[in-house]
Image (tube, rainbow, N blue to C red):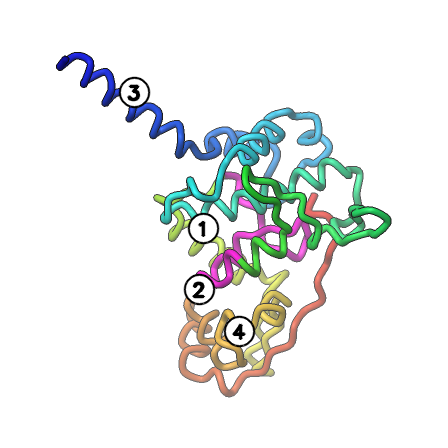
Amino acid sequence: MKRICIISVALFLLLSNLAIALPDNTLYTAVLKDYVHKGRVQYSALKKDKRLAEYIKQIKATSIQEIPKNEIIPFWINVYNAYTLFICCENYPLKSINDIALKSGNKEIAVWDYAFVELKDKKYTLNEIENTILRPLGVPEIHFALVCAAKSCVALRSEAYTADRLDNQLKEQATNFLNDRTKNSFDASKKLCSISKIFEWYGKDFGGNTVQILHYISTFLPQPYHTEFKNKAKDWSIIYSEYDWSLNE
């Protein structure tokens, strides 16, 4: 009887682990390391590699009900980015992700609004993942992790996001992006910031007005801008730079 009980417990634990199995981030990281360098993606080579399709298959086999609370943000960031890579590969060669138009009956739908992101229990759009699932969680740094396959977007990491390293990964993404002077620049003589349209499109996530946005940005900048924006943000003006939607290859 005792042996049967031990076997039953072991079987229960095994089945429980199988039930909450998440996509293999080790596999996804290996793919990213091979084809993403300094944020640029080698789509022509990635298109030929079956490992991304395998990772997508694992996502499709995952139920939203199975995702532990601490895994929700990294899971959805990885899903968003992996499916963005996948749809670009499916339509490569490609000048811009905005050139992809998917059909629903006789109607063409922009890639952002087409429900092609598939999990076990539902299909999602990229916009739904960003605006309905992730943004309400109140972590503005997700905007420095979600990659829209454009040159003006944040750089795609060469690794998956994971629950145990998420805070550091998001902080590093924000720091790298805000210190990239090709995307965000600061003219002290004119008290003028030229920053990414991400801060215009999602302004309320960063505070909603110029002073609050600059207070947020100051967190990730070195001196003298850190102190300047923290204490004298009202003296500065913001313009939003043009967004280059060319493919990030």
Q: CA distance from mark 4 to mark 1?
A: 20 Å
Q: CA distance from mark 1 to mark 3?
A: 30 Å
Q: Evaluate if marks 2 and 4 touch, with contact meaning CB atoms under 8 Å apart.
A: no
SS class, disc 4: helix
SS class, disc 1: helix
Q: Residue at x 60, y 69 (%)?
A: 195
Q: CA distance from mark 2 to mark 1?
A: 11 Å
Find disc 1 in the rendering and name its residue: 73
Find disc 2 in the rendering and name its residue: 138
* Front residue (pair 53, 1): 1
Type of amino acid under label 2? Gly
Per the rendering, the mark at residue 11 is: 3
Query: Is 212 rendered above or below residue 134?
Result: below
Q: Residues within 10 Å of mark 3 (few under 14, many from 20)?
A: few
Query: Is 137 rendered above or below residue 226?
Result: above
Q: CA distance from mark 3 to mark 2?
A: 39 Å
Per the rendering, the mark at residue 204 is: 4
* Front residue (pair 19, 224): 19
Residue 180 horizontal/vertical position (percent) = 56, 59
Is residue 84 on the magenta stretch? Answer: no
Q: Residue pushed farthest bottom?
A: 235
Residue 224 horizontal/vertical position (percent) = 44, 73
SS class, disc 2: loop
Q: CA distance from mark 4 to mark 3?
A: 49 Å
Q: CA distance from mark 2 to mark 4?
A: 11 Å
> Tag 3 or tag 4, which sits nearer the N-term?
3
Residue 171 horizontal/vertical position (percent) = 42, 56
Quarter of the image where one finds residue 123:
top right
